[in-house]
Every structure is written in structure tokens, then in C-alpha cells.
């Protein structure tokens, strides 16, 4: 999966969680939850749909590694790489 | 005959608009069944019925605004043999006047006899048209088929536009309830700093063993600890109506913020009897429904106390305003790392500030203080939750 | 096919005569008896010329004794003949009422089903020729009250022409009401005999706004009223009852179920009348289809007056029907 596709999927999932925001306008270093006003409950829902959609399980201790768009993207890419190997 | 009335879904509710009947005459209903969908200031609410029986007839047509307490439907209590079907058959001895009186329950004070042709009445019943609102142009002002058809056409025309913006309605509901509270309830405020480190560690451990879908949020522990403490201090799990009335069930109303602005407070029924996992499941169920304005009437009416939690990266402390007729609201600020002194040592701890706003007519600070201390104690022993 | 049949213009009187002739031609058991039916050609000239055509054995003048000759007709029917008994006016029929009700109507029942009475009693009936209370009344309800009788009302030329044939097929006594008011009226009907039932009412005009239910001399008045009403956009359905006993309720109930309103028009007195019966059945069977109370237009409850204007005022006229329907539909 290319980075563009991952990004597109992420935006779709975020749009579902926070329908009245525009996830595609997120900058690389924006804190996703703060920018999109996602509370802890919705954040958990996002983790759940990430797992459903991409098969990537983010453990709680890694939450800190996924706060910005850039971080989240590279985390997912790594996870996909790991799955392949 | 059992009367099903427009329920009050909060002290501030005066009326609601019947959007849809979810059952039809002849259906058997039992306690807890959804009988109707009503639009209130808090959105579209599924109304539950608390009687058992068979629906005899609907008295209110869909699309009608009805005051709280108005009779909306009649039910045959279960166990009574039914003769609902018979009404359709030619029954020479059946006085039509009796039906007329039955169908005008709203204005009990000025029950007037409406003249309706048998055909018009039949069509009105089939389409849940309230004959009170139909002007008759037949002989002696009787309502005819033409008049009812006209009414049906009118309703069909307005139906799609009728759902008004829930955000505006919710704003005004909050305004009404909070103004009433602030002007009537003498609030006292207490605050307690709670070391949340052990609870977080317990959570981390618990979540590492759970699938993503079953993961717990910190707020679940706060809810559970509050429920336990309420068992110890039942005066706070109460309403103020002609004095303090303790409530048997502990149904914590959980404040859900709406992304469009405003809040909705669904009840977590029997919070004290639920495990932390069950509380989490309840949250997973009611939060999305609250945001979609799809709550049930009991979830809006049964709260015995309110709990508000700021969540991550928010304010450190929240001082609530009591939702009448409740007598207390518990608040939790953001969980954050703080310098924390204990046993002569200074350390960094995850800290949450718990507050209580109490109705001073109902309880005093001492009870409130002990209550917050109890919450603290429970959170220091998360295993026991 | 209706188009294929030749139509002729004929009076009601001529239609009745053709029906009689044909009956006499078709079945030699058939004979006609009554006051002045032979040499005089009938009080209303219905049987004029039949004596010459069929001879004295089959066209019999009788003494002025209704009980006697109606009773004789009943006896002949029991004995295997197919008598047609003419009673000049419905007023005089009461002299034979005992024979009709106590004998003709009861024998089948009292003989345990062994004795049929296939007699046809034609009775001149109705109002409107200044014959006063001695000769004009609408007494169909008297007969329609009696079980064992079949009571027919020929309100149209079609029925005047064809009902007699169907009546003669009945094994049981038939009272056939003919309307003196209609005798000179001309209408177009098929030249040939057309079979009609004597069990069903008939929708004479279709409409969706109201059912006008009627019989006898009022049928044409109602049809004329319906034509008037159509000009102002009211589509009235006209139901001719035709059979007053046993009454065919299915036809008028279906009509009322469709139009949701009913006006019953008859020339008979209102109380305890055919319209009372029809109204009751509508209420019993299709109450929930009614969009307005059933209304009735009936004869005034007086002996029929001689004076022309009073006679007219005594029974429903076209204008009355039009106005009542307008009132029922527009409520003004």
C-alpha cells in the first residue's frame, strides 16, 4: 500500500469519526486529536476502525507515537512492513 | 384501559412532537418496548412504554406537537379479553358518540363532541389523524372524508421540513435547565485532588490483555468509583422534590458533548451493578446514539446524578451545575502529571481533580467531602472496582 | 353487442303489450284475465287487440271482483296454468290482498314445499295522472313486506318489455308493478326481447359522488336529476332496485361503498317504506363507508290529492332530487 493510499484511507476513517471536520486539511505536524477535536472515546473508536480496516493493532503504550499525521503515517507504514516480513 | 401519555423527558420539557408510532393498534407491548419516536429539544427520542398490554388505538397523529402528560394512546391491559377487531364490523348497538369522546382526551376540561362521518373517522384512524385538529365542512360542521384527506395531504407536505435543527433546540433546553438550576439551587462546591497513578497502571495492564474493541477508557474507572461511593452516600443519589428523596437505583447520567455544540446526558442504568467492562460497553452503545439523537426515553429521564469528565488535554478542574431535580453533579478534570507530595516525599504522579457540586438544601459539605474521599479510596484500589 | 341490435322508439304501454303478446305466443299455458282486459282492451289500453289475436279463452274479462278473479288465477296456477292476472290499480288490489297474502304467498310453505303458485299479478301503480286517492298510490311496500312473494317494479321501458317473461318463469307468485304515469312516455329500447333478471338491482347510470337509490316511476326522475347534476360536476350513480322482494342489497351496498353517500328516492310514504329498509341495510352493512348520513326523499304522508299542483307536490320531483343531492355534497 502506497503512502497516498494510506493517507486517503486515514482521512476517510477520520471523517467517519469526526464528520464535521476536514481531515484532508491536516498538516503533517498537526496533533490529530487536538486539530480535529477528537475526544478519548472517539480516539478509541479510531483505533478500533484502524484495526478493522488495515489490520493494524496499536497497543496503548504506542498511543504517544501516533499523535501527528506524520507520526501516524510512518507508524502504519512500519506496521505494514512488519506484517509482510 | 391504560393510558399512554407523553412522558416528561426532563424538568425543562413542556411538549414533544410525535414523529412516528413504532407500533400499531393490535400490537402487544411489554415494559421497555419502544412505542414511539418523539422529537424533543434533546433530539429524536425513542419512547419506551412501561405498561404491558395490547395497543387499542392511537389518539395522536404523527407530526403533532403534544404537551407532556397528554394521552397519546390507549392500551388494553394484558389478560383482558380483547374486542378491538369488533369495532370494524357492523355493530348496530355501538354508539358512535362514545368513540368521539374517547378520541378527545387532550382537552379533558372541555370535551366537545366532534361530528365525524363514519368513513372520515375510519380514514383518520388508519392514518393516525387527530380529529381535534381537523375542521369539518360537512353537514352541521361534521368532518368528512374530504376534510381528513385534506389534513393528510397537509401533513405529508410539512413532514420533511418539520425536523428542526436539534442544535438550536438543545441549546435552549440547556439554557432553560441551567438557568432554573442556578436560580433555584444553592450550590456548594468541593474539590479533591486524586492520585490516579495506580488506576492508570491497572488500566494499562487490563487493556494489554483486551482486544482493541474491549479496551477500557480511564473514565470507566471514574464512573465506577463514583457509583460505589454513591452506595455509601445515598443522600447524593437523590432528587429534591418536596424535600430529599433518595433514589433506589444508581443511574449515573454521563455528560456527552455533541460535536455540533451542546450536551446530552444519557443515564447509565444501575451503574453500581455493572462491571467496568459492562460500563464500557454501555458507553460504546450510548455515546454514538446520543450524538445521533437516538436515545431512549428512559435514558433521558432516569438519571439520579450527573457525572461530567473533561477528558484529555482539557481543563484541570470542572465545577458543575446541578441538573434539577438531582442534588449533585460530580466533575473530573483532565488527568495530568503533577508534582505530588506524599509521606514527606515529592513525586510525579498522574493526578485527576474531582469536584462535587451539591444542593445545599439536600446535603451539607461534610457528606460531600466524605463522598469525594470515598471516590479517592476506591481509585487507589482499582482491583476492587 | 348493443350496436348490433335494432332499437325502436316505443311507449311504456306498447312495451308492456309486446311483453304480453310474446308471453301468450310462447306458452299456451299463459292466459290473461282481469277487468276490461278483453273487449275494452284494458283500462289503460295495454291489452288492446289481444282478444282479437288470442281469443276469449286466453284473454278473459272478469267481473268486478278482485278477490274472486285473483283467487281464480291462484287456483289456475296451482292447477298447472301460467295465469297473468291484471289488477287495474293498486288501490283495488287490496280487495285481493287476502288471496295474495294468505293463499298465494303461503301455500308453498304450508304444503311443505309441494304446492307452487306460479301466478303473475300485474298491478297498475303510481301517481301522477290526476287519478286521486281512489286510483293512485305507491303501495309497493305493502307487498314487499310479505315473505313468499316476489315483488317486481318495472321502472323502465326495458323492464316493462321484458320483466313479464322472467316473471312467468318463476315457480312462485310474482307481483309486477307497472306505472300508469309512464304509459305514454316514449323511450328507445331494443326491438327484440332481451332477457332480464328478476333477482338483481341495476345501476342505470354510473357515478362516483353519490348513490341515488330508487325504483318505479322515480327511476326516470332520478336519471334526469343525475343529468342535471352532471352539469355542475356532481357524478351521481343511479341504482334502480327493480326487485323489491327479495331485495338485492349487494348492488346498492357496493354502490354506496364506492360513493360513500346515499339518497333514496321513492314515491311511497316515508314511514315503514322500501327506503327505510334500504337505509337500515346501508347502516348495518357499510356504516364505515358512509361519509354523510343517508337521506331519503319520499311521498308526502297524505292520501294522493286530485289537484295537479298538489299531486306534484306530494311526491319527489326532479328539482327536489337535484337540490337534496347538492345539499348533501356541498352542504349549502
Image (cartoon, rainbow, N blue to C red):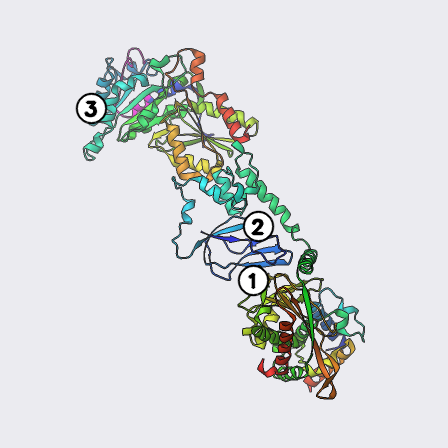
Cα distance in 3D space between marks 3 and 1: 85 Å
Report whether B124 appears left or right of C20. Answer: right
Residue B179 rendering spot, x and y as whole percentages: 69, 58
Q: Residue at x 42, y 10 (%)?
A: C307
Residue under circle 2?
Answer: B62
The residue that label 1 is drawn on is B298
Q: How many numbered marks does the figure carry?
A: 3
Relative to B40, is A59 above or below? below
Q: Is residue C324 left or right of residue A45?
A: left
Which of the chains bears the disc numbered 3?
C
Pointer 2 indicates a residue of which chain? B
Tell me the chain of label 1.
B
Nearest the camera: B74 or C34? B74
Q: What residue does disc 3 label?
A: C75
- Same chain, marks 2 and 3? no
Residue at (42%, 57%) from the top-left corner? B78
Q: Specify whether residue B331 is in view.
A: yes
Circle 2 — which element?
Answer: loop
User: Does label 1 or label 2 sit earlier along the sequence?
Assistant: 2
Disc 3 + disc 1, Cβ < 8 Å: no
Name the residue nearer the viewer: C224 or B328.
Answer: B328
From the image, state whether disc 2 or disc 3 is nearer to you: 2
Where does residue C140 sit, x and y in percent of width and height?
34, 24
Are marks 3 and 1 in one subunit? no
Looking at the rendered structure, which numbered label has been put on residue C83? none
The magenta span reads: C20-42
Residue A68 in the image, given as x and y percentages of width and height: 77, 76
Amino acid at each position: 500500500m502506497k503512502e497516498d493510499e494510506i493517507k486517503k484511507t486515514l482521512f476517510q476513517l477520520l471523517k467517519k469519526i469526526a464528520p464535521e471536520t476536514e481531515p484532508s486539511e491536516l498538516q503533517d505536524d498537526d496533533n490529530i486529536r487536538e486539530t480535529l477535536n477528537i475526544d478519548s472515546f472517539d480516539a478509541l473508536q479510531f483505533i478500533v476502525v484502524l484495526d478493522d480496516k488495515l489490520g493494524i493493532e496499536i497497543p496503548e503504550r504506542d498511543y504517544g507515537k501516533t499523535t501527528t499525521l506524520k507520526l501516524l503515517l510512518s507508524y502504519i507504514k512500519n506496521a505494514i512492513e512488519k506484517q509482510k516480513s | 384501559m391504560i393510558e399512554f401519555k407523553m412522558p416528561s423527558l426532563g424538568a425543562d420539557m413542556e411538549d414533544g412532537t410525535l414523529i412516528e408510532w413504532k407500533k400499531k393498534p393490535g400490537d402487544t407491548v411489554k415494559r421497555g418496548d419502544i412505542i414511539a419516536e418523539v422529537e424533543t429539544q434533546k433530539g429524536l427520542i425513542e419512547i419506551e412504554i412501561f405498561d404491558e398490554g395490547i395497543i387499542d388505538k392511537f389518539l395522536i397523529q404523527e407530526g403533532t406537537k403534544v404537551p407532556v402528560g397528554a394521552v397519546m394512546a390507549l392500551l388494553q391491559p394484558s389478560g383482558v379479553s380483547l374486542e378491538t377487531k369488533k369495532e370494524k364490523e357492523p355493530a348496530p348497538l355501538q354508539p358512535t358518540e362514545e368513540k368521539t369522546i374517547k378520541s378527545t382526551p387532550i382537552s379533558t376540561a372541555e370535551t366537545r363532541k366532534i361530528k365525524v362521518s363514519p368513513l372520515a373517522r375510519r380514514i383518520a384512524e388508519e392514518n393516525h389523524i387527530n380529529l381535534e385538529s381537523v375542521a369539518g365542512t360537512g353537514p352541521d360542521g361534521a368532518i368528512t372524508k374530504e376534510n381528513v384527506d385534506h389534513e393528510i395531504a397537509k401533513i405529508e407536505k410539512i413532514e420533511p421540513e418539520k425536523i428542526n435543527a436539534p442544535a438550536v433546540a438543545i441549546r435552549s433546553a440547556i439554557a432553560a435547565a441551567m438557568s432554573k438550576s442556578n436560580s433555584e439551587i444553592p450550590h456548594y462546591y468541593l474539590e479533591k485532588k486524586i492520585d490516579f497513578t495506580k488506576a492508570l497502571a491497572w488500566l494499562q495492564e487490563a487493556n494489554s490483555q483486551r482486544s482493541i474493541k474491549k479496551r477500557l477508557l480511564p473514565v470507566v474507572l471514574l464512573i465506577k468509583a463514583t457509583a460505589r461511593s454513591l452506595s455509601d452516600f445515598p443522600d447524593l443519589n437523590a432528587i429534591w422534590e418536596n424535600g430529599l428523596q433518595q433514589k433506589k437505583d444508581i443511574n449515573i447520567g454521563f455528560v456527552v458533548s455533541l460535536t455540533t455544540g451542546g450536551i446530552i446526558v444519557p443515564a447509565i442504568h444501575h451503574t453500581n451493578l455493572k462491571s467496568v467492562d459492562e460500563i464500557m460497553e454501555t458507553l460504546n452503545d450510548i455515546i454514538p446514539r446520543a450524538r445521533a439523537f437516538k436515545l431512549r426515553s428512559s435514558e433521558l429521564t432516569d438519571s439520579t446524578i450527573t457525572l461530567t469528565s473533561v477528558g484529555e488535554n482539557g481543563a484541570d478542574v470542572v465545577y458543575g451545575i446541578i441538573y434539577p431535580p438531582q442534588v449533585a453533579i460530580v466533575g473530573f478534570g483532565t488527568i495530568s502529571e503533577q508534582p505530588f507530595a506524599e509521606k514527606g516525599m515529592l513525586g510525579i504522579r498522574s493526578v485527576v481533580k474531582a469536584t462535587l457540586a451539591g444542593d445545599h438544601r439536600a446535603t451539607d459539605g461534610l457528606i460531600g467531602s466524605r463522598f469525594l474521599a470515598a471516590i479517592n479510596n476506591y481509585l487507589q484500589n482499582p482491583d476492587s472496582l | 353487442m348493443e350496436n348490433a341490435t335494432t332499437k325502436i322508439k316505443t311507449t311504456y304501454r306498447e312495451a308492456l303489450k309486446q311483453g304480453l303478446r310474446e308471453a301468450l305466443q310462447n306458452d299456451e299455458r299463459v292466459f290473461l284475465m282481469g277487468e276490461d282486459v278483453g273487449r275494452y282492451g284494458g283500462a289503460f289500453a295495454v291489452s288492446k287487440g289481444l282478444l282479437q289475436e288470442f281469443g276469449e279463452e286466453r284473454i278473459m274479462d272478469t267481473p268486478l271482483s278482485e278477490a274472486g278473479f285473483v283467487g281464480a288465477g291462484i287456483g289456475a296456477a296451482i292447477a298447472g296454468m301460467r295465469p297473468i292476472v291484471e289488477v287495474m290499480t293498486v288501490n283495488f288490489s287490496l280487495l285481493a290482498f287476502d288471496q295474495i297474502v294468505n293463499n298465494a304467498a303461503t301455500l308453498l310453505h304450508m304444503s311443505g314445499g309441494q304446492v307452487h303458485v306460479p301466478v303473475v299479478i300485474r298491478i297498475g301503480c303510481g301517481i301522477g295522472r290526476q287519478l286521486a286517492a281512489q286510483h293512485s298510490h305507491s303501495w309497493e311496500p305493502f307487498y314487499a313486506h310479505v315473505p313468499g312473494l316476489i315483488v317486481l317494479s318495472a321502472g323502465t321501458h326495458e323492464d316493462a318489455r321484458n320483466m313479464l317473461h322472467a316473471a312467468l318463469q318463476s315457480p312462485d307468485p310474482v307481483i309486477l308493478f307497472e306505472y300508469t304515469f309512464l304509459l305514454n312516455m316514449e323511450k328507445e329500447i331494443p326491438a327484440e326481447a332481451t332477457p332480464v333478471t328478476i333477482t338483481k338491482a341495476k345501476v342505470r347510470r354510473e357515478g362516483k359522488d353519490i348513490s341515488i337509490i330508487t325504483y318505479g316511476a322515480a327511476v326516470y326522475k332520478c336519471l334526469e336529476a343525475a343529468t342535471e347534476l352532471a352539469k355542475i360536476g356532481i357524478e351521481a350513480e343511479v341504482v334502480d332496485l327493480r326487485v323489491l322482494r327479495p331485495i338485492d342489497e349487494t348492488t346498492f351496498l357496493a354502490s354506496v361503498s364506492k360513493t360513500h353517500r346515499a339518497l333514496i328516492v321513492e314515491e311511497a310514504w316515508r314511514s315503514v317504506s322500501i327506503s327505510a329498509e334500504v337505509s337500515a341495510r346501508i347502516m348495518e352493512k357499510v356504516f364505515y363507508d358512509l361519509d354523510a348520513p343517508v337521506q331519503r326523499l319520499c311521498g308526502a304522508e297524505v292520501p294522493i290529492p286530485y289537484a295537479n299542483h298538489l299531486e306534484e307536490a306530494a311526491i319527489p320531483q326532479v328539482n327536489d332530487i337535484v337540490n337534496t343531492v347538492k345539499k348533501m355534497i356541498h352542504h349549502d
